[in-house]
Image (cartoon, grey):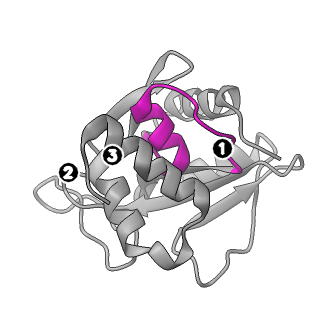
């Protein structure tokens, strides 16, 4: 089941209403930065503070999402799926003593400037990871990329002049 723009905005608003700050990541972050939906999305990747994970999980469970066993080869911290098969992958991060994002060792670690993106989904402004973060993540994972990922990078390259 694909994740629609309406689904993304609903989840974003619900979590904002609980004072849980999230940033879109993955394909929806690409589309937010581009300002338009360019393809269908199988899931929603989000970044959230590690301290918010228990509240985020409990809240989304009240909306029918359930913790799904994760593939050990993947590096997200939490995967939630509802009965319709809609999936949310939560990538957690922490802030260090100086208020900067702590760089993690795994593939999607968020550097200090990685949570500075903003864009729009269906005309609504949303926070998302930066273009440089998306390029960094895709560069580190070329062996796992699908055709859609290469197309995403091509679109970002055309709009922002980044090299992949």
Q: Position of residue 27 (x, y in %)?
A: 54, 47
- Relative to residue 71, is residue 85 depicted above or below? above
Find the magenta span and give its range.
Answer: 22-42
Q: Residue 113: which disc?
A: 2
Q: Position of residue 64 (x, y in %)?
A: 82, 45
For image coordinates 48% across by 60% down, the residue present is 91
Would you name the residue on which mark 1 appears? 59
Pinpoint residue 138: horizontal percent, then vertical percent. Answer: 41, 64
Of mark 2 and mark 3, the one earlier in the sequence is 2
Residue appearing at x 25%, y 49% in the figure: 162
Q: Are marks 2 and 3 in contact (CB under 8 Å)?
A: no
Q: In which quarter of the image is the C terminus?
A: bottom left
Instruction: Residue 87 in the image: state x and y as whole percent.
Output: 72, 53
Secondary structure type for disc 1: helix
Indicate whether residue 70 is drawn in magenta: no
At 57% from the left edge and 76% from the top edge, which residue is drawn? 74
């Amino acid at each position: 089941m694909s994740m629609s723009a309406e689904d993304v905005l609903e989840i974003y608003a619900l979590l904002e209403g609980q004072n849980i700050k999230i940033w879109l990541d993955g394909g929806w972050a690409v589309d937010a930065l581009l300002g338009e939906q360019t393809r269908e999305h199988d899931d929603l990747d989000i970044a959230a503070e590690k301290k918010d994970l228990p509240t985020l999980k409990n809240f989304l469970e009240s909306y029918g999402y359930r913790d799904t066993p994760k593939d050990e080869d993947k590096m997200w911290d939490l995967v939630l799926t509802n009965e319709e098969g809609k999936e949310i992958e939560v990538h957690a991060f922490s802030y260090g003593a100086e208020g900067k994002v702590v760089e993690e060792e795994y593939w999607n670690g968020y550097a200090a400037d990685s949570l500075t993106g903003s864009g729009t989904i269906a005309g609504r402004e949303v926070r998302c990871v930066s273009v440089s973060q998306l390029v960094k993540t895709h560069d580190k994972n070329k062996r796992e990329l699908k055709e859609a990922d290469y197309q995403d990078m091509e679109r970002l390259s055309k709009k922002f002049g980044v090299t992949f």
